[in-house]
Amino acid sequence: MKKEAEGKKGLTAYLQASFPVRTAVAAGLSFAGACGFPWMLHLEGAWLGYSNSILSVFVFVVLFWLMGRVLQMDFDGKIYRWFWPGLVGTLFSLCMVFGTQLDLKGSVPFQKGSMWISIVVLAVIFTLLVRYFWEQLPRCMWVIRTKNSKEAGKRKGVEEEKAQKCENLTMQKRGWRSFLITAVVIFICYLPVFLAVYPGFFVYDAQDEYLQVVTRNFSTHHPLLHVLLLGGVIQLVYKLTDSYNLGIACYTLLQMMVMAGIFGWCVERLKQRGMKRFGRILLTLYFGLCPVLVMFSLCSAKDGLFTGMLLIMVLLLQELCGSPESFFQKKHAVILFAAASLGMMLLRHNGFYAFLVFIPVLAFYLKRYTKKLLISMLGIVAAYLVINASLTSLLHADSSEHQEMLTVPISQLARVYSNEKDALPEEEKQILYQYLSRDALARYNPKVTDGVKIDFNNEAFSTEKAGFFKLWLRWGIKHPFTYLNAWFMTSYGYWYPDTVIDVYRGNTVFTYTYEDSSYFGYEVEQPGIRESKLPALDELYRRMSLEIFQQKLPVVSMLFSPGFLFWMMAFLLGFFCYQGKWNSVVPFVLPILCYLTVLLGPTYLVRYVVFLWVVVPLLLWELVRFDN
């Protein structure tokens, strides 16, 4: 106790020094931060537009004010308390500086000393700020809870006796009615957009999935469950009505109902956990009107349904981590969790890998229930493997493709080849040509690997895997920075908030050519055709999808940014780690693992991380409920 007190006193004395010393430290940090700030801005050349601008003065003044507040904080002397703020602050500074360079120049200048000095300075400043705000959050939440408690207390005396007399059946009926009303409201919110983009957003490999059903020529490139669901509904309706559009519309309506039902169930679940009416109304409107969620609720791609399954899992994991014994006694909850887990894995291949890694994490956290937990989880995994293998066998699906698993190595080899073609030994290039043709390598696009990996020679890889990996390792040792830049260029949009998603710029699809933005696919692929009933609303969604429209609006633009949503998630989860609230952290490890898997994908698109738009509201609700 004595040593701890002395440590706290020493640290406090350092941070809360006399006014002149504190002012000097704040001024020094602020000036260093103002000097390093341009590395986070889209500025070229000597940065004269910033350094010789009043903007730099504003940056210095804001930082000086913040540092003055931070240095007055009464931090304790426990060094480990700086771990989580340091982790978040350092990663944020790295991502912001790296992302800016990637966006401006297509590469990070790893050997530039001034960049690393700026990263260190910014890391120190962000670490201090993060811990400062994390220290303030519990007080803010206490004020909110106190206000809500007083309002609730006025009604408690009148309602408490009545509530205690309510039978469980009556409460269940009320819950079902509330759930249905919420789901219907969300569905009604979707209807104008559905009419505007009729028959729905039939895009992102939709034609390919549908043709697999029509031709009976299946492949495991796309999840077979989704292929059968999408293609089966459309083909069935087409056979009955001779209309492709009506088939697409029926599938879209079916998915809208499923998504509205899942979101309605989520709101009802949070109501049972204490969410007040205002919060439920706000969340319902968010689920029904948020453009990103609307887009993918009306989109034929599997990403919307995957998000729905993951949302169910996170909500149930919160209950499992909060009260394991009670959860395992609820058969309906266990069955629903198993069904959602199977759905998530069958809808996206990366969901399976995330789930596998999550099992030991959850088992370690719930040590007292390891046996019961492992039996349940491994049973779900076994069911997935049986279903997946059965579908592959029954449909005689081609499972010879490997390029999806090799996206990052393919992009890294292609970048080295593109940058160093003339300097590479001829025998090494000949090895590469066995797997990737010259034409495929010539199509290398730093932001998206699809053009190269589409012509990957799977037969050659199956025959000689060792040759591929030996070449990849050899070039990686010689060109480590090139490898890092190749990977960053296909993933930085997920962790750099200021990204404009334009990875398909110049690509021609069925009805248009991508230009400034490829935020969302928007179109109706053949054999469907757009028949808008509300052209003005259709035009709004077209502009949000294909133009730099929402990016022109300050603050609002960040609500559409995957990078911003990621950092909101990281900030909130970091706060719960800092407070040691692991019950609030563990359920969100699964979405984090899903997020990590997409970093190994072919490019950065909103569709792969739609789940961030439902995870962050759950974390915000956890913050509101936070009890220190």
Image: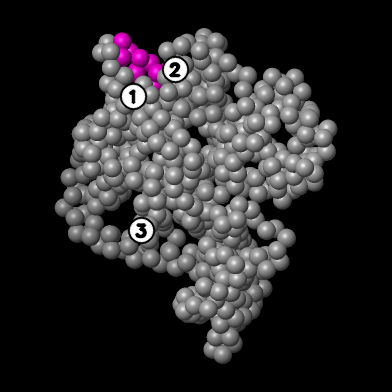
Depth check, mark 3 against mark 1: the one in front is 1
Q: What residue is rendered at 17% in x and 45% in y?
A: 162
Based on the picture, tell me whether residue 235 belongs to the magenta stretch: yes
Where residue 596 sits: x, y (%)?
Answer: 57, 42
Q: Earlier in the sequence, mark 3 or mark 2?
A: 2
When the figure is inspected, residue 509 is found, relative to residue 383, above or below; the finding is: below
Residue 268 left/right relative to 464? left
Look at the image and give the residue range highlighted in magenta. 227-239
CA gap, disc 3 and disc 1 = 33 Å
Q: Which residue is mark 1?
A: 528
Q: Amino acid at mark 3?
A: Leu
Assign the magenta stretch its main secondary structure: helix
Q: Nearer the viewer, residue 533 or 480?
A: 533
Q: Which mark is residue 553?
A: 3
Q: Amino acid at mark 2?
A: Leu
Q: Quadrant of residue 429?
A: top right
Q: Amino acid at mark 1?
A: Gly
Residue 250 left/right relative to 362? left
Q: What residue is rendered at 39% in x and 27% in y?
A: 525
Q: Earlier in the sequence, mark 3 or mark 1?
A: 1
Q: Which residue is mark 2?
A: 211
Q: Which mark is residue 150?
A: none
Q: Residues within 10 Å of mark 3 (few under 14, many from 20)?
A: few
